[in-house]
Image (spheres, grey):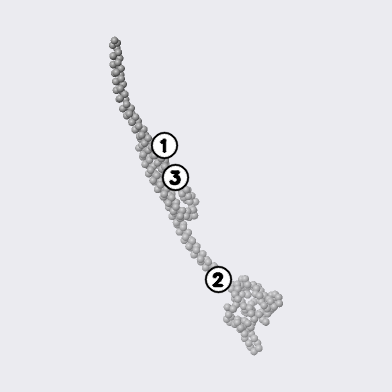
Amino acid sequence: MNRGAPIVALLALLNIHCDTRQGSSVQPNLTAQNNELRAKLEAERKKNTLEQQYIEEATKTINSVHDQLMALQPIETTLRGVERDKVESVAISPTQREDMLAAIDAVQQSLQNDMKLLEEFRTRTQNAEGKVAGLEETISKLQAVADAKSKEIAELRESFRQMSETVTSLQQTHVSDQMELEEKSAELRRLTTELTETNAQLYEVRYILGSADGLVLQGVLQETRHFFRRTVALSPNPPLKLFESADSRGLRELPLAAPNTAITLYPPRPNGSYHVVAQSGNVSSLIIDDPATFWQTRFVVIAIDR
């Protein structure tokens, strides 16, 4: 009988028993490690998700600040150009000034809101366990730009305010000057009308043509008889409403239905101030050679002798 066989069998039983005990203790350790790893992975996933959301929010705010600054550039360019060229009253209308001021206010309010968000992002970045690479530096730079731009906005508002006051003053002056100009224009029109009327009166002359008998009947001439002698003279108050009116500056010729020498003028005109030219048949024309002398008396009666 082999005595070693029972010992080998016993050792085998002991080994099996030990392996069984070791397997039962390893299994819980693996489960715990697996759970711990899963928890870490979940925490890391949540951290990455929050970090991604944070980056998106910060980027959105940064873009918003950039857009606001870009929106301000046209207004700033216009104001700078107006200030440089000194043509406030022409370059910007009251409506444009109101729109630009509203735009500046909107940009300034948006920048203030975005600056608060940037400060919150910066604080969150500084307090975060794992900082996002480059984001804090970007926020700092943009915040510096926004701060400088806020100062420029304040300067623009002050420049805009002064400019608006200047424009308002210029507009008031323009309105006053316009009113004064309109008053002077009205006065000039009145004086021009008065001058025209005065000139018309100054150069207005009257004349009447007719037979001596007909003019006597009209009261323009008066007749005096001494026995068989007849004398015709100008009436003391001839009815001028019966006379034709004309402007002596343009009156150089009067047509006469009479022969060359068959007319008499009342009052008489000086020799050399006129002459009569025969046309054809019994038609002739009285030509005025010297209007100033001829019209010393502002009316004339031309009696055509038959």
**Which quadrant would residue 11 be assigned to in this image?**
top left
Please give the name of the residue rendered at 49% of the width and 64% of the height, measured from the top-left corner.
183
Please give the name of the residue rendered at 33% of the width and 29% of the height, measured from the top-left corner.
31
Please give the name of the residue rendered at 39% of the width and 42% of the height, measured from the top-left corner.
118
Find numbered disc 2 in the image and state the secondary structure of the residue it sits on.
helix
The disc at residue 197 is: 2
Say which residue label 1 marks.
134
Q: How many marks?
A: 3
Query: Of marks 3 and 1, which one's residue comes earlier in the chain?
Result: 3
Q: Amino acid at mark 3?
A: Asp
| Residue 76 location (% of width, % of height) | 46, 48
When the figure is inspected, residue 147 is found, relative to residue 281, above or below; the finding is above
Q: Which of the pair 225/55 is nearer the observer?
A: 55
The disc at residue 67 is: 3
Q: Is residue 59 found left or right of 257 in the rendered image? A: left
Q: Amino acid at mark 2?
A: Glu
